[in-house]
Amino acid sequence: MAQLAARGISVDFPLYHSETRSLRRAVLDRASGRFGADARRRPIVRALRDISFSLASGDRLGLVGSNGSGKTTLLRVLSGIYQPTAGSLAVDGSLASLLDPGQAMNPDMTGRENIRLHARFHRMAVAEIGAFEADVESFADIGAFLDLPVRNYSSGMMVRLSFAMATAARPEILLMDEWILAGDATFMDKARQRTETMVRHADILVLASHSAQVMVEWCNRLVWLEQGRVRADGEPLEVLSRYLPPQQFEQLRPKRSEQPEPIPAPLRSGTSP
């Protein structure tokens, strides 16, 4: 059974090009408390501060907060892209992340070469790579561009290929940022269906989004981040009642009363999708 636990996670980023005394003093005197200095008195940004939670099979955690609150930074810590400055992370189960379009892709390689590299990185058997490549090629649907270097892709093509590769597997723990919920209508219709299938099969979901409706439909727990700290942690409507402006929350409640589809639950092995 999959598990994911964060214990006292903190992340500091150094502030480069801030060597002048006046700028350093201005930064350190900021009232928000998000700026400080490390042990060598170099200016830093406190991106996350003392984040703790524990997730088990069946948990769907949503991260809400304004831009810059720490949502994406936390997802990158959970995925292993960033190492925490303090605290620890325990991961038990296979993990996949949908965070950045183009993540882990080599821009000088073709799309097809990146697909095969992705398969080898995830230690797929030789017999599995052909089917994986065919699935990604069909879903991404970028035609002849698949055999051109990725640096020639538009942002939309990059999203298509990145999404197709990341969702071709069935992880136990799924991390998602909100970029996957936006894009051209034709692609996103089938992308949403594929995402919902992936969410349904995952034991644990961690999702960052500005969409309150998505949070209510997909999550059974929310964490509200503000300036890198946990402002609230609890049941989705309870947290949203504090996070959203009153008028926006009231608009959300009628949709909730319409009884949307139940929260996707993880499917066990041997259960039909």
Image (spheres, rainbow, N blue to C red):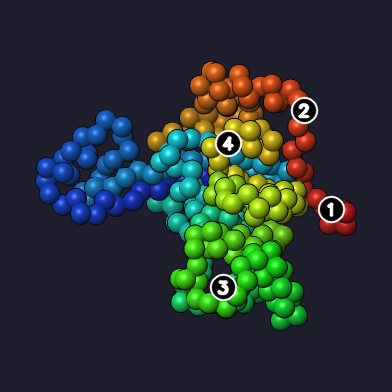
Residue 202 seen from this side: no
Spot occupied by residue 257 in the image (x, y as percentages of width and height): 74, 22
Q: In this view, does 260 lie to the left or right of 112?
A: right
Q: Which amino acid does label 2 sit on?
A: Gln
Which one is nearer the viewer's eye here, 220 or 90?
Answer: 220
Q: Circle 2 — which element?
A: loop
Label 4 Cα crowd, 10 Å radius (few <14 / some 14-19 / many 20+): few
Upstream in sequence: badge 3 or badge 1: 3
The three-letter code of the residue at mark 3 reads Phe
Q: Mark 3 points at which residue?
A: 145
Q: Which of marks 1 and 2 is in front?
A: 2
Q: Distance between the residues labelled 4 and 3?
A: 32 Å
Q: For numbered disc 3, what is the local secondary structure? A: helix
Numbered tag placed on residue 259 in the rendering: 2
Residue 218, percent from left and from top: 68, 39
Left or right: where does residue 179 sit relative to residue 195?
left
Closer to the chain start, of discs 1 and 2, is: 2
Q: What residue type is labelled 1?
A: Pro
In the picture, the disc for residue 273 is 1
What separation in Å lies between label 2 and label 3 (alpha carbons)? 43 Å
Which residue corresponds to the image point at 55% horizontal and 23% vertical from the top-left?
248
Snapshot quadrant of residue 208: top right
Q: Where is residue 145 in the image (x, y as percent from the top left)?
A: 56, 73
Q: Residue 211 carries which label?
A: 4
Q: What element carries label 1?
A: loop
Q: Where is residue 125 in the image (x, y as percent from the top left)?
A: 71, 78
Three-letter residue code for mark 4: Ser
Are circles 1 and 2 on residues that touch, CB within 8 Å? Answer: no
Separation of marks 3 and 1 at Cα, in angstroms: 33 Å
Query: Residue 141: which disc?
Result: none
Q: Which residue is drawn at 20% across and 54% down?
A: 17
